[in-house]
């Protein structure tokens, strides 16, 4: 069975990290993988998480299996964050605890292929590199819609809306709710309302990828794109993650939420989702979900979390401003002020692949092909070196 296999291609992002680890350059910088780093270059454990974990150690009484869809209190907490208290626990909403946001995407993708086997999934150009792989592996044909305009460094809104008008009824459109990966450019509230109106009119289903809630403007502000879809009453899927906003990367703590037309449809659909989970990983891991539920269910711990989340968000904002200013001070002719306007951890820098290759070979700076930079990997310690290197390759 295993003879004659060719080597698997390295993952575009995780493979970059492996190469980074082997690099002997003392000034090397990893701006590829999408994890938050503090000023020391570490991915910290939040204080609220540490305290919640200690409480779990002291109070936990069993390591028995979780339900297929996860704990009901976790589902309630997820829905409250995503949709607000008015929709949390509503009859037409169901949530399953999944292994990370990627697990939520995959469970949703397999459910779509089961419920609507003729449906295609539409992805933005560009999108997160793993989106295509996840949906293709679930058997969904991939289509694309325009999103980013390299000339304006913003959303190509006219072309986007025109393309979405042409999506056939029954197809599914994946949309990034905030902190678009890889561009860092988001739709505004007016544009979200236009997209939701098109979905309701044309009869396609939105699949909302919400991996970065709280990293853009704030928990409530970042969820503004969901409201127009809820108001239409149409069905939709939401994949969400606590990797970034809780720092629970290794705990793989995410969710998939379905919003059906009514409670009966939601109950029936969720039963099938649970069966898909049973056939795949049977039930979710408990630890990360219990951390989230503990923090969100305690007013004091929730307050600590909000402060820590705000601190992460503001650090990324300040680095964006310093990064753009650092390039300006070095006399770089290209205008990089758009970096400061983008949101979240990623920036579509505009560096071409040849420049990316030079940064890696000559300076030990690791950036994903296409020029996507994880701004959270930049610190005040490595900023000058990074700006000098970029100025040189430009």
Image (cartoon, helix red, strand yellow):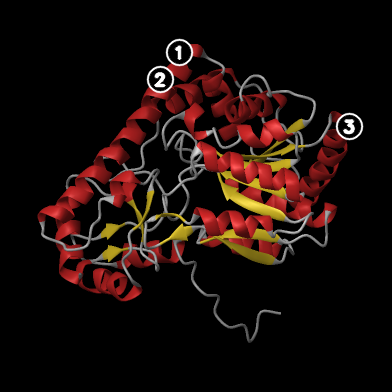
Query: Residue 264 has which mark?
Result: 3
Residue 65 point in image, percent of width and height? 73, 35
Secondary structure at numbered mark 3: helix
Quadrant housing residue 393: bottom left
Residue 59 point in image, percent of width and height? 58, 17
Residue 334 horizontal side relative to residue 357, left or right: left
The answer to whether residue 2 is above or below residue 149 is below
The residue that mark 1 highlights is 300
The residue closer to the viewer here, 366 or 353, is: 353
The answer to whether residue 297 is above or below residue 110 is above
* Mark closer to the observer (3, 1): 3
Q: Residue at position x 66%, y 37% from top?
A: 229
Secondary structure at numbered mark 2: helix
Residue 75 horizontal side relative to residue 327, left or right: right
Q: CA distance from mark 2 to mark 1?
A: 6 Å
Give the mark nearer the N terminus: 3 vs 1: 3
Q: Residues within 10 Å of mark 3 (few under 14, many from 20)?
A: few
Q: Residues within 10 Å of mark 2 (few under 14, many from 20)?
A: some
Q: Residue at position x 36%, y 68% from top?
A: 19
Residue 180 point in image, percent of width and height? 47, 49
Quadrant housing residue 255: top right
Query: Residue 304 has which mark?
Result: 2
Give the mark nearer the N terminus: 3 vs 2: 3
Say which quadrant the N terminus sits in: bottom right
């Amino acid at each position: 069975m295993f003879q004659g296999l060719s080597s698997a291609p390295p993952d575009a992002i995780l493979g970059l990290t492996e190469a980074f680890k082997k690099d002997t350059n003392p000034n090397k910088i990893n701006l590829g993988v999408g994890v938050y780093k503090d000023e020391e270059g570490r991915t910290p454990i939040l204080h609220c998480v540490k305290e919640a974990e200690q409480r779990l150690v002291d109070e936990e009484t069993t390591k028995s299996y979780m339900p297929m869809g996860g704990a009901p209190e976790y589902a309630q907490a997820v829905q409250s964050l995503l949709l607000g208290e008015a929709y949390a626990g509503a009859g037409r909403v169901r949530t399953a605890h999944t292994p990370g946001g990627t697990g939520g995407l995959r469970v949703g993708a397999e459910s779509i292929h089961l419920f609507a086997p003729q449906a295609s999934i539409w992805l933005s150009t560009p999108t997160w590199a793993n989106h295509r792989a996840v949906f293709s592996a679930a058997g969904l044909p991939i289509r694309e819609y325009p999103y980013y305009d390299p000339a304006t460094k913003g959303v190509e809104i006219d072309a986007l809306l025109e393309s979405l008008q042409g999506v056939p009824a029954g197809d599914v459109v994946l949309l990034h709710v905030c902190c678009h990966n890889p561009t860092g450019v988001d739709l505004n509230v007016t544009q979200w309302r236009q997209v939701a109106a098109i979905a309701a009119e044309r009869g396609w289903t939105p699949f909302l990828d919400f991996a970065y809630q709280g990293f853009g403007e704030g928990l409530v502000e970042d969820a503004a794109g969901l409201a127009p879809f809820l108001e239409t009453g149409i069905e939709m899927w939401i994949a969400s993650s606590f990797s970034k906003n809780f720092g629970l990367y290794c705990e793989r703590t995410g969710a998939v939420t379905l919003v059906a037309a009514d409670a009966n449809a939601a109950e029936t659909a969720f039963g099938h989702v649970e069966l898909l989970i049973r056939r795949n990983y049977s039930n979710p891991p408990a630890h990360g979900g219990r951390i989230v539920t503990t923090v969100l269910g305690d007013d004091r711990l929730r307050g600590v979390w909000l402060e820590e989340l705000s601190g992460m968000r503001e650090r990324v904002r300040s680095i964006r401003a310093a990064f753009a200013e650092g390039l300006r001070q070095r006399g770089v002719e290209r205008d990089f002020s758009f970096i400061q306007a983008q949101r979240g951890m990623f920036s579509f820098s505009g560096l071409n692949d040849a420049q990316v290759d030079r940064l890696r070979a000559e300076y030990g700076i690791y950036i994903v092909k296409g020029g996507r930079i994880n701004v959270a990997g930049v610190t005040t310690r490595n900023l000058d070196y990074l700006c000098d290197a970029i100025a040189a390759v430009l």
